Image (cartoon, rainbow, N blue to C red):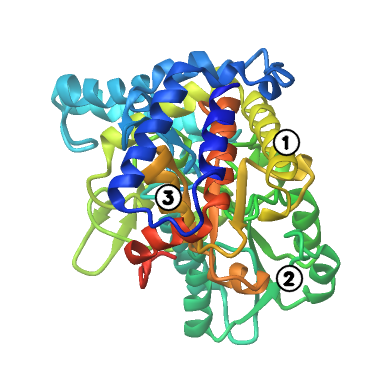
């Protein structure tokens, strides 16, 4: 009898009328820890059927670069499945930031002394690294900013306020993250432009035929996610670009989820703007990138102005700086930019094709295990086809609140997932639900962690009443400001 069978038998024999106190829960958690420490999950026969891994991406070796994965949470070794919210940082990124502050710390573009010149060179080189990562035409098309939200706001206000007018149309999607939806809605209110939305199927796939019908000669902007942060759908970028450009609309790609997980080539995509965050691709928080076509960037008025955005200022006139500096106002996050470049180098060395293949295998494995082990007890949202689904699994356990499931996973099993609406309220309302549990993967996740997730969900499902009784008081009325 293996570890899970032992634990499974224990739970199934617990009387349903048993009142589980916090102390009993703690004892059960300790019991779970002991038996799983004694018997490795890799010995479970089911897992041995799926031992074939991507030979070019070894997650077990990669894990050694991430110190935080050695941490224990609630007595269990951390299982981190919240990568769509943010990713952990490898030693290489951490060391690059430390090296900057200990050897090169100075402001950029403001001094002739050695430290300032060295810091400026490092920061400018970081732009080149990110330009290569997305196959931009030139490094000066790459604008460093705070995150995806910041990048989209730059486009919406710097391009939108100058080019949109009453009656123009902006096409968004029901699956959009608030960071792509809200800037355009604000700008539409200011300019009098009209917002249109593209719906999805019940499986979370964009209705492309509807898009073809809704786009008109008045459409000026089409903005959409490369990948949904909830249902995981990987959208057909080239198909959308082709339709949008037929009416001379610009295409703004929200790459927050797609850039860290799939190969990105702005030239091949044919898009006009791309926004993505550093912290979702192993980089520091507070870092992001806006890439834009040079001709569009040159025509845009700087959105935020001040230090380092100008060549000259008089009392009555201003000469703006060259790209990209006119859009990087004030002292930037220098160390963050350098750390982001190191993250891009790390991913480039692995190969983004390999990243995508690894996550596809994890998704396929998860869907198979969910179906076979949990059956109707779990409701999964989004496409079942791993070919068009990124490393995101949003689900619910029947008759159990998503916050309760997430709290139990963390408290009893040390598994970190996200619960709520994931900054995509309209998508959840479209699906007829008020929240989901979301497990999301990255390069350091392994199948044993999925086995642990499935086993934990089986236990939670078996003891719904007790789990609800224990954790509902902790989450009742809990409202996550970001959903």
Mark 2 vs mark 3: in front: 3
**Camera-nearest residue between 89 and 14:** 14
Q: Is residue 18 above or below residue 258?
A: below
Contact check, label 1 and label 2, Cβ < 8 Å: no
The residue that appears at 36% across and 50% down in the rendered structure is: 146
Q: Is residue 384 shown left or right of residue 130?
A: right
**Camera-nearest residue between 74 and 191:** 74
Q: Is residue 409 shown left or right of residue 356?
A: left
Residue matched to label 1:
364
Instruction: First in sequence, mark 2 or 3: give its number.
Output: 2
Looking at the picture, how far across and down is residue 431, in whole percent? 67, 69
The residue that appears at 54% across and 71% down in the rendered structure is: 434
Looking at the picture, how far across and down is residue 393, in whole percent? 62, 47
Cα separation, mark 1 vs mark 2, equals 26 Å
Instruction: First in sequence, mark 1 or 3: give its number.
Output: 1
The residue that appears at 70% across and 65% down in the rendered structure is: 249
Q: Which mark is residue 408?
A: 3
The residue that appears at 48% across and 22% down in the rendered structure is: 346
The quarter in which the C terminus is drawn is: bottom left
Looking at the picture, how far across and down is residue 25, in whole percent? 35, 46
Mark 1 vs mark 3: in front: 3
Q: Give residue 70's quadrant in the image.
A: top left
Total count of labels: 3
- Element type where label 3 sits in the image: helix
Instruction: First in sequence, mark 1 or 2: give its number.
Output: 2
Estimate how packed mark 2 is, as few (under 14), some (14 to 19) or many (20 or more) residues with alpha carbons within 10 Å.
Answer: some
Residue matched to label 2:
199
Mark 1 vs mark 2: in front: 1
Q: Is residue 298 shown left or right of residue 67?
A: right
């Amino acid at each position: 009898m293996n570890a899970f069978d032992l634990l499974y038998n224990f739970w199934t024999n617990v009387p349903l009328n048993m009142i589980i106190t916090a102390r009993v829960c703690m004892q059960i958690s300790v019991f779970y820890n002991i038996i799983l420490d004694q018997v490795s999950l890799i010995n479970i026969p089911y897992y041995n059927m799926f031992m074939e891994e991507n030979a070019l991406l070894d997650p077990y070796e990669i894990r050694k670069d991430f110190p935080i994965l050695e941490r224990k949470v609630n007595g269990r070794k951390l299982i981190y499945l919240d990568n769509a919210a943010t990713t952990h940082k490898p030693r290489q990124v951490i060391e690059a930031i430390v090296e900057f502050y200990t050897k090169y710390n100075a402001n950029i573009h403001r001094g002739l002394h050695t430290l300032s010149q060295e810091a400026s060179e490092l920061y400018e080189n970081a732009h080149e690294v990110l330009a290569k990562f997305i196959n931009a035409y030139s490094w000066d098309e790459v604008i460093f900013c705070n995150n995806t939200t910041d990048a989209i706001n730059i486009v919406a206000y710097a391009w939108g306020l100058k080019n949109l007018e009453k009656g123009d149309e902006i096409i968004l999607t029901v699956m959009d993250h608030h960071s792509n939806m809200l800037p355009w809605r604000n700008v539409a209110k200011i300019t009098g432009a009209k917002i249109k939305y593209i719906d999805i199927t019940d499986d979370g796939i964009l209705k492309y035929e509807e898009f073809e019908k809704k786009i008109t000669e008045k459409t000026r902007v089409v903005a959409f996610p490369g990948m949904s942060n909830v249902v995981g759908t990987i959208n057909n970028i080239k198909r959308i670009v082709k339709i949008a450009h037929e009416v001379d609309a610009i295409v703004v790609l929200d790459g927050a989820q797609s850039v860290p997980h799939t190969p990105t080539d702005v030239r091949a995509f044919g898009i006009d703007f791309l926004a993505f965050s550093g912290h979702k691709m192993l980089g520091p928080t507070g870092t992001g990138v806006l890439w834009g076509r040079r001709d569009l960037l040159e025509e845009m008025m700087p959105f935020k102005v001040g230090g380092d955005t100008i060549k000259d200022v008089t009392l009555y006139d201003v000469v703006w700086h060259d790209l990209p500096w006119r859009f990087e106002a004030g002292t930037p996050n220098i160390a963050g930019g350098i750390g982001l470049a190191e993250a891009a180098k790390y991913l480039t060395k692995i190969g983004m094709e390999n990243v995508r293949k690894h996550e596809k295998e994890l998704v396929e494995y998860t869907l198979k295990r969910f179906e076979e082990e949990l059956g109707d007890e779990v409701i999964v949202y989004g496409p079942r086809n791993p070919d068009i689904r990124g490393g995101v699994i949003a689900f619910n356990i029947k008759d159990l609140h998503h916050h309760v499931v997430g709290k139990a996973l963390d408290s009893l099993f040390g598994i970190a997932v996200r619960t709520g609406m994931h900054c995509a309220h309209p998508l959840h309302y479209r699906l007829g639900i008020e929240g989901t549990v979301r497990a999301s993967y990255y390069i350091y996740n392994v199948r044993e962690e999925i086995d642990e997730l499935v086993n934990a969900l089986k236990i939670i499902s078996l003891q719904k009443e007790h789990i609800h009784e224990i954790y509902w008081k902790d989450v009742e009325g809990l409202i996550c400001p970001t959903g």
